[in-house]
Amino acid sequence: EVYNDDVIRTVENPIYAEGALAVLKGNLAPDGCVIKPSACDPRFLKHTGTALVFDDYPSMKKAVDDPDLDVSANHILILRNAGPQGGPGMPEWGMLPIPTKLVKQGVRDMVRLSDARMSGTSYGACILHVSPESYIGGPLALVRNGDKITLDVAARTINLDVSEAELNKRRAEWKQPETRFERGYGWMFTKHIKQANEGCDFDFLETAFGKPVGEPSIF
């Protein structure tokens, strides 16, 4: 028996009509990225915005507090080099703060895009887990300030509105970041960590042909 149908609802009266998560794919995220449509402003479910790109968390954090930052609510804030290798470790940086300038104007949501992750209790139009990540040369690494990005959650797509010829030119100019770890755990992590769409796990933890691994004998 249902005592409060605002808590336990019928399928005809859901809080949200679809699943809470959606995976988007396109030339910006060939292996996918994740958005939580139930937690973002509905107007961003189909949106084209101008990219504002940050290559690291400190520069992004400094910029969003700048009262003279050239940004509007229709921009798409991008943080890259925050994935499995770029972070390293895919830190919880995905809920990029809304610039102070916009908060004072009453803006409470805008599209934010990264190869990082965020807490499941966070909210907003945040697109996460972009794969492959920018640090290893994924398409997110090729985005420039002023580029247009289009997302359509219903169609499950996200695309950088730049020609393939221009992307190829940028790809040829892109330089792999310098190796940060030459020994120890950092070196092992870099060599064996997989991308977000593969679980952000070590490749050596997989078993051949799905065979179970027995526990060691303890005497």
Image: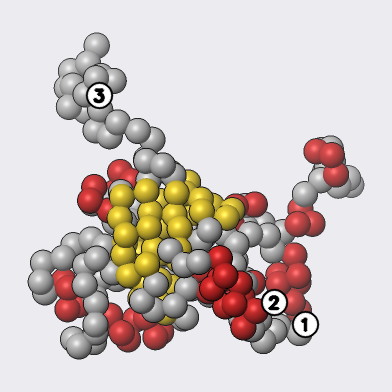
Helix, strand or loop for disc 2: helix
Q: Nearer the viewer, residue 91 or 157?
A: 157
Query: As drawn, is 184 to the left or to the right of 61?
Result: right
Say which amino acid is labelled 1: Arg
Circles 1 and 2: CB atoms closer than 8 Å: yes
Q: Is residue 209 above or below residue 194?
A: above
Occupied quadrant, residue 200: bottom right
Label of residue 183 in the image: 1
Could you tell me residue 191's position as x and y percent? Answer: 76, 70
Label of residue 8 in the image: 3
What's the distance in space between the residues labelled 3 and 2, CA to CA?
47 Å
Say which amino acid is labelled 3: Ile
Helix, strand or loop for disc 1: loop
Mark 2 — residue? 186
Could you tell me residue 144's position as x and y percent? Answer: 44, 77
Say which amino acid is labelled 2: Gly
What's the distance in space between the residues labelled 1 and 2, CA to CA?
7 Å
